[in-house]
Amino acid sequence: MVSPAFNPGPGGQLPPTAYRGIMADLLRRVAERADPAAFRELYETYGPRVKAYMMRKGADAGTAEDLAQETLLTVWRKAALYAGDRGSTTTWVFAIARNLRIDRLRREVPWQELPEWRLAEPAEDAQPDEALAEKQQQARLRAALADLPADQQQVVTLAYLEGLSHSEIAARLALPLGTVKSRMRIAYQKVRDALEDPA
């Protein structure tokens, strides 16, 4: 249940200063009283935003979810370290998220940001050569996925087509979480290599 403090005014939105004050108050309640209701509101506010940020930076859905959860758990543990004079709660939460992302990148080299051209919205009227290049790219992707061993195809399908997290895949397949993550990393690297522009 959302706190009454979140009720917007007649315009339907909270003024930025009021929103920042509410977020800071929730964080203070977590720091001082380990208030689960306050933490739930913080989680519902920032969890989806952190996950979306991670996916924009190139993480698959499962990794993005894992990092969002790790970010909010860090917020729970370190709420007392937040200092309002150094920035908003949003700035603080996303600083934690960025640091966790960097740590994960250092441990798992295969996860890399997508090139800018992959993030761009496709043009409505693609030129013939662009359409051909896109078809060729899609054909390479299908071929790369078809070439994966069955166990790697399985985890990729569950992650990207069914949207399951790594932990959900592990439960579905009765596999250790580390095995699922390992298969995802290897599959990702194979597909990425296959999609590199041919020399």
Image (tube, grey):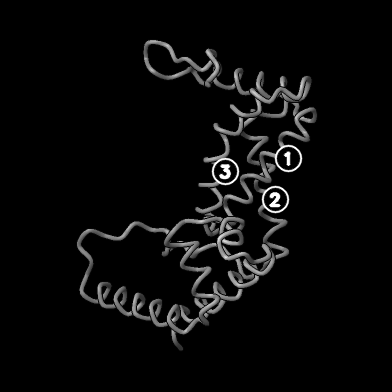
Position of residue 183 relative to residue 29, above or below, is: below
Tell me, for residue 50, which label it has, or none.
3
Q: Position of residue 126 (x, y in %)?
A: 23, 66
Front-most of residues 104 and 131: 104
- Residue 179: image x %, image y %? 66, 69
Instruction: Indicate the position of residue 198 as horizontal and vertical percent values.
Output: 44, 86
Q: Residue at x 53, y 59 (%)?
A: 60
Q: Where on the picture, by quarter, is residue 139?
A: bottom left
Q: From this viewpoint, which residue is outermost toward the front?
A: 174
User: Real-space Cα distance between discs 2 and 3?
Assistant: 11 Å
136 sits left or right of 53 in the view: left
Label located before the other in sequence (3 or 1): 3
**What residue does disc 2 label?**
100
Residue type, mark 2 in image: Leu
Task: Identify the mark nearer the N-term, 1 or 2.
Answer: 1
Residue at the far bottom in the pictured view? 199
**Which of the two discs, 1 and 2, sits closer to the camera?**
1
Residue 165 relative to residue 118: left or right: right
Marking on residue 74? 1
Residue at (66, 39) in percent of width and height: 72
Q: Residue drawn at (38%, 78%), measured in percent from left and top?
A: 142
Helix, strand or loop at label 2? It is helix
Q: Are marks 2 and 3 in contact (CB under 8 Å)?
A: no
